[in-house]
Image (spheres, rainbow, N blue to C red):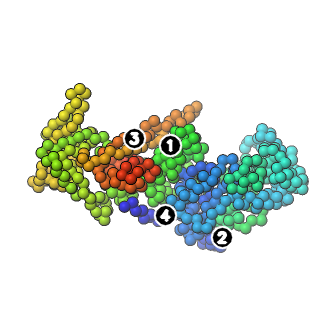
Amino acid sequence: MNQEVKVEPVASDFIRDIVEADRESNKHGGRVITRFPPEPNGYLHIGHAKSICLNFGIARDFGGRCHLRFDDTNPETEDVEYVQSIMEDVRWLGFDWGEHLYYASDYYGKLYAYAEALIQKGRAYVCGLGQDEFKEYRGVPSMPGKEPPRRNTPPAENLDMFRRMRAGEFNENQYVLRARIDMASPNIHMRDPVIYRIRKCPHHRAGTAWCVYPMYDFAHCLSDAIEGITHSICTLEFEVHRPLYDWILDQLEVPCHPQQIEFARLNLSYTVMSKRRLLELVRNGLVTGWDDPRLPTIGGLRRRGYTPSVIREFCRRIGVTKFGSLTDVALLEHCLRDELNRTAPRAMAVMDPVRLVIDNFPEDRVDLLDAVNNPEDPADGTRQVPFCRALYIEREDFMEEPPKGFFRMSPGREVRLRYGYIVQCTGVDRDPATGDIRAIHATYDPATRGGNTPDGRKIKGTIHWVSARHATGIEVRLYDRLFMLEDPNDVPDGQDYKQFLNPKSLEVIHAMVEPVLAEAAAGQRFQFERKGYFFADPVDSKPGQPVYNQIVPLRDAWAKRQGRG
Ligand code: ATP
Ligand code: MG
């Protein structure tokens, strides 16, 4: 029943407008080729999903293609584990790169040749300044920098030095290759940026073939050009790198000159998104792993019970802009409820059970009551729910002295048991020592099967229940926001974002559930009536013994704020 919901077409945005105009003017022969370029140094998160939907979505909408390229130029932090997970996540989100899987590391030979070409043109030089001197020579934006000592060395000498760097003759950080641009540029990225460095560390794909590695700014534009990318879409922080992107491509003979276009990255409230912080949470055991259902990682969202279509719909609704902002996580949850309301079958689970005994219901009798699986989806049919003399209801659905407006169970009052009968509470049994309620007693009206009242009397409250004899106790994991602070990326001075972790972000309870929930296969989603949406955990569930993750509670704060619901 967890079928995917059709996604509405994507409205235009400033990037699609550029692509459209380029196509009309035949800029790249009418071609549209985009790429999603993750660095394999962590797991993908929902911010990456925004970029994935954008890049693959544009390729799809304009009859082009989107490459998956691993931007793997940093041997120290990258790993095949991440490569695998990234491919899995992109596929799970519903996108396909076909045969266009690339690695920047496959271009090392070409990139090295481009670097030599730059040197030969007198546009790059080997620099031996130490870290402090490097900064000192570079200066600050408001003041021009100084010419580094080796800046005007002849190309032949630089070529020789660069080849010796490549041959492993020097130590890490002893020399770097720098582009020779402008030490007085107001843009610090143009003050002879480093384009190659020495790293004596094996690479997860290239092994020990190289000990010089290209920097991101050098590798990225050239990888784009090598692949014939037409529109190189990236996040806003690269706006200041764009002059460098264009400079490098202008200096060299490249097959094409892609256009870099920047958009604002996604930030979500009550969570962190930087890979460095996610890694820190995982490494310090503050969450259970990369797929902890509280994390905004794709693996975490998947494990929580999100569907790819919900994530795509969310990305469609947020759109793309040039302005950074904090997106309310409630919007994501709103998209989730919207879909699950349509697709998730309903069932009854009692989270905090108390016994309800129907004293006038025969001891051995079992009534099989018809229950609608999904009122939003008639095709989902009905099921039979067993009803007996002893049931469980929610402790909070009973009040001995109800305040005004409480229409659930209380002494002397009638209440409807969902799909069942109208019952009237007759009293309670208490533990003589503690005073706690051990059982609630009631009588049922046999004429009200299915919850109808033949005499038309009004019953205000309806509560859910399970048959005690047929119920199974199962583990349910209730999740709350991982952080207590709306923007944990912006913590007060001198404080650590980890201080704002919500100590109650996970609560494990044991619920009593109706048979259909106990029999559910891992990976199934349900609405627990009156509670929320739940997902049979794909890792910890066993046949006949599912473990449920709360995907989201029923209450929709976002729709409320928008004046709907
Ligand atoms: P790092 O934190 O290591 O810089 P990153 O989050 O930028 O990493 P990459 O692997 O370089 O991760 O990202 C791949 C692509 O996803 C890039 O094009 C990047 O711009 C985009 N991206 C990353 N984070 C977000 C985000 N929060 N919103 C939108 N796009 C994002
Ligand atoms: Mg990055």
Q: For the residue labelled by badge 2, is the local secondary structure a helix, a strand or a loop?
A: loop
Q: Which residue is found at the position 31% from the left and 54% from the top?
A: 516
Whether label 3 touches label 4, CB < 8 Å:
no
The residue nearer to you, when weighing 320 against 164, is 164
Q: Position of residue 55 (x, y in %)?
A: 57, 61
Whether label 3 touches label 1, CB < 8 Å:
no
Q: Say which quarter of the image contains residue 33.
A: bottom right
Q: CA distance from mark 3 to mark 2?
A: 56 Å
**Residue indicated by mark 2:** 28
Q: For the residue labelled by badge 4, is the local secondary structure a helix, a strand or a loop?
A: loop
Q: Which residue is found at the position 78% from the left and 58% from the top?
A: 112
Q: Position of residue 333 (x, y in %)?
A: 42, 51
The mark that comes first in sequence, 2 or 4, is: 4
Residue 169 is left or right of residue 304, and the answer is right
Q: Amino acid at mark 1?
A: Thr
Work out whether residue 367 can be spotted.
yes
**Residue indicated by mark 4:** 10
The mark that comes first in sequence, 3 or 4, is: 4
Q: CA distance from mark 1 to mark 2?
A: 47 Å
Image quarter of the N terminus: bottom left
Q: Which residue is found at the position 51% from the left and 59% from the top?
A: 92
Q: For the residue labelled by badge 3, is the local secondary structure a helix, a strand or a loop?
A: strand
Q: CA distance from mark 1 to mark 4?
A: 36 Å
The mark that comes first in sequence, 3 or 1, is: 1
Work out whether residue 244 can be spotted.
no
Q: CA distance from mark 3 to mark 1?
A: 14 Å
Q: Amino acid at mark 3?
A: Val
Q: Residue 288: which numbered mark, if any?
A: 1
Q: As displayed, is residue 287 above or below residue 344? A: above
Label count reads 4
Front: mark 1 or 2: 1
